Image (tube, helix red, strand yellow):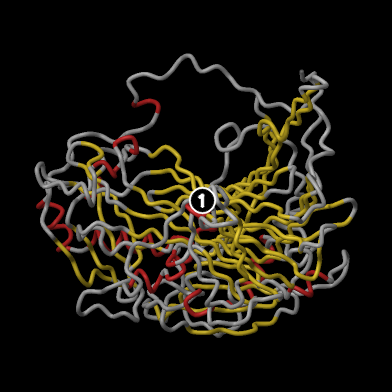
Amino acid sequence: MTSAIQDTQTDHAQTLPTHPLEPLSRSEIERGVAILTGSGELSGQLAFSSVSLVEPPKDAVKTFTPGGPFTRALRFLGVDESANGRQAGSFDARVNITTGELLEVQRLSGGQAPFGGRDLVQSIKLTKADPAWQAAVRRRGVEDMSRVQIDMWPGSGPLPDGVDPTHRLARTIAFVREDKTDNGYARPLQGLIAHVDLTAGRVVHLEDHGAAVLPPESGRYEASHQPSLRTDLKPISITQPEGPSFRVDGYAVEWQKWSFRVGMHPQHGLVLHTLSYDDAGERRSILYRASLADMVVPYGDRDPMHTWKHVLDASEASVGNLANSLSLGCDCLGEIHYFDMPTLLADGSVYTIENAICMHEEDYGVLWKHRDLLSATTEVRRSRRLVVSSFFTVGNYEYGFFWYLYLDGTIQMEVKLTGIVGVSAVETGAEQPEFAPLIAPNLASPIHQHLFCFRLDFDVDGENNSVYEVDVEPVPHGPDNPNGTQFRAKTTLLESEDAARRDTAPQAGRSWKIVNPQRTNRLGVPVGYKLLAGATPTLFAQADSYVGQRAGFAQHNLWVTAFAPDELSAAGDITLQSPGGEGLLRYSRDRNIEDTDIVVWHTFGLTHIPRPEDWPVMPVEYAGFSLMPVGFFERNPALDVPPSPHACK
């Protein structure tokens, strides 16, 4: 039996915030919109892209006491239209809703505000209204334009001659559906790419590389379209008769010595703030802020349908605005607490994403165990973890971000990737499997990468931290190693930002240790946490390519920078149609990072070589990392976990 606990958020959409980091409420967003639109600083109709809380300074958060005053400021990104209906350009506006003051309005140059729902609607409308595009579709044997599915992609990267790079641009590609419920990705209209100028309101360039055969098979994946369904799956019930072990106060959570705050950011998605652990009555800080900082999906196929694709899904599409409303028994199972999140629509109205964040506990097998052979006794403890998760739909893909907190002080981030892979229609005999393997008859899927960069603002027992790289290396043959069996841990201090541009080395068991040199444990060693990465790739595109410059963060698995409050996004603050060279390529400028307030950026992910099993919908693939205490505790912090009520022998 699945169940959900009563949501203790008392209509947060209308209540006043009680903490400086509390997510924005509906009424706060509405007040901010009213201040901005009433200021007269923007002309004509506005199309909003996103709204976010301007986070207060760290010291203001750390010194805040419940009931004390604090200021709330909002950041709006969007597009400003002139009276004749043409878009005048993107804006970045800051509003203080505590005082009712418009702080600033900046016109963006060198980039555009992120895409929103209005851009998608316009792109579809303008594409389908273009006579040349209609003619190209008919040449492919399709007469009913209502059956054509349009996907919008960013107009970033190389542009055709005559396209104005200062305008708001999109590319569109097309697919054919049998009906409204069909999976259109089964039948791509190969070779047809429309370049849409949203500022001018028209298709400004049409690429037609020639039609290919429409793949013959349907791509339907709904239960009603399967030949049969399994009948031998028995129910799994997760019950907690006494309720869950966590406590929730608004967006503040306490669970098994952990405490933190949860939130959602339009570009960074699911965010954890002020993560700490109660160690024998002392609340010890570990992370001030942890979230996605950006991600990129670069395609390696030489096919002109894909060679330009490298979406920065977080910053170009505002991934946080695309959170799913999660369903009990489907996305989450057990005793669930949900968090709703208001989001801003293009017209300035507010829409609440219900159940945007799911939180629950999971049994996780054995935590620790030992059987003493002499005494014939066994001690076993069950592991448990707290799960905080969200799912986001970005076009054809779904991304689930799952934070796990464990009883032994371990923190884990797991990304779950599913959805529908990108596709091409190919003629029989024209396949190029090294670039795009076949996944169905006449349907290929290009090789590509999913690379995520997480920003980890460490606060290990205080702000002043250092980072060490730890490799395991063999000891050379010699008098001290006559048998050639010895190996040792080599620890290297990363003193500067340049020195801290590092990559994984699985063959060396490489990890990175974040320590507080000003606090030692009882063994005299600085307390710390280690970042344990998987065998994860970096960007395959050349560093000097437009992808390499726009997604420079993916050139390395590790970056460490000195803390700066405005350095939050790995690819830069504004990325849509940006030329690149921003984000970590600019933040990392060889500042000192020893014994100071630092931010660790970790890039990880996977390289996807599609397979037939990924079609018509892809089973979940996983990527992620762990943060593990290293000398942070005096000994195993999970010794106090009580035995299972069931006898263990």
Please name the residue shown 18% across and 40% down the image.
Answer: 215
Image quarter of the C terminus: top right
The image shows residue 361, relative to residue 130, as above or below, that is: above
Q: Position of residue 63 (x, y in %)?
A: 84, 71
Instruction: Classify mark 1: residues with Cα within 10 Å, few (<14), some (14-19) or many (20+).
Output: some
Image quarter of the N terminus: top right
Q: Position of residue 94 (x, y in %)?
A: 61, 78
Judging by the rendered image, the residue that carries numbered circle 1 is: 534
Which amino acid type corresponds to the residue marked 1 in the rendered image? Gly
User: Left or right: where does residue 640 sit relative to residue 560?
Assistant: right
The image shows residue 129, relative to residue 179, as above or below, that is: below
Please name the residue shown 52% across and 47% down the image.
Answer: 400
Residue nearest the observer in this picture, 161 or 127: 161
Q: Position of residue 394 (x, y in %)?
A: 43, 53
Number of marks in the rendered image = 1
| Residue furthest out toward the front | 479
Please name the residue shown 59% across and 78% down the image.
Answer: 496
Look at the numbered disc 1 and give the secondary structure of its residue: loop
User: Left or right: where does residue 645 sit relative to residue 91?
Assistant: right
| Residue furthest out toward the top | 232
Residue nearest the observer in this picture, 63 or 110: 63
The image shows residue 397, relative to residue 62, as above or below, that is: above
Q: Quadrant of residue 271?
A: bottom right
Observer able to see residue 107: yes
Q: Position of residue 506 (x, y in %)?
A: 49, 52
| Residue furthest out toward the right | 281
Residue nearest the observer in this picture, 279 or 160: 279
Observer able to see residue 16: no
